Image: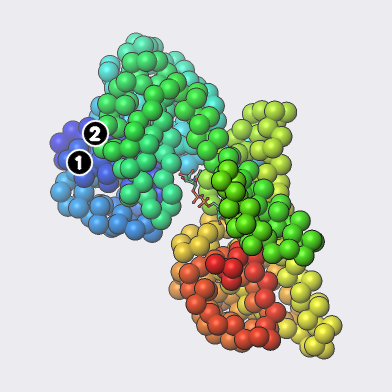
Amino acid sequence: MNKPEVVMMGLGYIGLPTAALIAQNNTHVHGVDINPKVVETINAGKIHIIEPELDLAVANAVKGGFLKAAISPKEANTYLIVVPTPFKGKNEPDISFVEAATKAVLPLLKENDLYIIESTSPVGTTEKMMGLIYSQRPELEGKLFIAYCPERVLPGNVMYELVHNDRVIGGVNQASTEKAVAFYKRFIKGELHKTNARTAEMCKLVENSSRDVQIAFANELSLICDKADINVWELIALANKHPRVNILQPGCGVGGHCIAVDPYFIVAEYPMESQIIGKAREINNYKSFWCAEKVQTAKLQFELQQGRKPSIAIMGLAFKPNIDDLRESPAKYIAQKVLQNANNEEYFIVEPNIHEHKVFKLTSYQDAAEKADIIVFLVAHKEFKTLKLKKDKMVLDFCGVLND
Ligand code: SAJ
């Protein structure tokens, strides 16, 4: 391949689709991942993650010679940092991957290069990385373009949203913002909104915190309604008939690698000020614990009433409906907790979007619903909506799958 124009540091859930999108536009991309297996898979034109339409985009990009993966970067004009930012210790953001990726490209940087961070990052990270770059390469001070541009795509709809979503782009100075906007304009149809790096960083955190807070409100209502003997799904549907009310749906907790994580980036930095954001995290975590406790209570109730142990179906393990992603999944947490409390009952674990799991023995949703005495709906997968449940079943619907 010719000298690449773009280096993509990180070929995960966001890096790989973004690399494929850029490459589709006949731009040479050198993708970097520390995992040699990932590199090998991509260079074979295949993918290591599940995302609709990504397989074809990567296959075409590799076949056309516009995307090549490697374990280390090369000289280019634009460097994108798209690596994970997990948390460590007591919910403190860990930017060591961003730092490592920056250090890896540092020796390759030259005047007029564009360096962009897309990874979700605590406020101030872009300025911090700028400090790191200029401390090692003082001759480049003021001669690079440095910006932050968070991704906003929804897993399951990434290839569409990457192109069509609006983006927020914040440079460390005006020239950097303009340069980054010009870069994204080549690939993105959504509007590109200009700001500074700190605002762009906070914007990403706020978007996901806002959703977390709204879901916490719905989850709090579900706890109240359980005590008040009111159907929370009906209640929310009715309240949402008001022209200015739009309550989200309660569930068995909040999962995934974004919404359940990003609010901590604000709380860790501004603990005194972020009361609602912190409390929302607590409520959403508590909701999963509460669901597991409810299963325990139902088990005991069944045993008291029927004089025998129930069989129990746990319906769904994914972190949200109709996907196969089990990472940070509240449903998986609840299944584990319920199994830890098992006392010789029979369990059927169901996840229609995966064929096998190394911990859970999976049962088909039809069999589980047919055989179990207690049916616990954790995820509103579309398959579950087709079930015709017998009248004698004890049903715990934590995700409103029966209320659609
Ligand atoms: N959930 C509810 N009730 C709802 C909606 C969602 O309980 O009414 C739960 C889901 O079941 C799931 C969790 O919330 O466990 C998160 O699901 P999600 O669909 O809200 O979001 P994610 O994590 O798949 O993707 C989010 C998106 N952010 C926003 O909608 C603000 C996406 O646009 C981001 O790009 C992504 O996080 C990210 O990477 O940050």
Whether residue 198 is visible to the viewer of this picture, yes or no, is yes
In the image, is residue 55 above or below residue 84?
below
Mark 1 or mark 2: name the one nearer the start of the chain: 1
In the image, is residue 215 above or below residue 296?
above
> Can you identify the residue that label 1 sits on?
25
> Can you identify the residue that label 2 sits on?
186
Whether residue 74 is visible to the viewer of this picture, yes or no, is no
The residue type indicated by label 2 comes to: Arg
Mark 1–mark 2 CB contact (< 8 Å): yes
Does 63 sit left or right of 49 as displayed? left
Q: Nearer the viewer, residue 360 or 297?
A: 297
Q: In which quarter of the image is the N terminus?
A: top left
What is the x, y in percent for residue 274? Answer: 68, 32
What is the x, y in percent for residue 242? Answer: 60, 48
Question: Judging from the image, what secondary structure is the residue with disc 2 in?
Answer: loop
Q: Nearer the viewer, residue 221 or 116?
A: 221
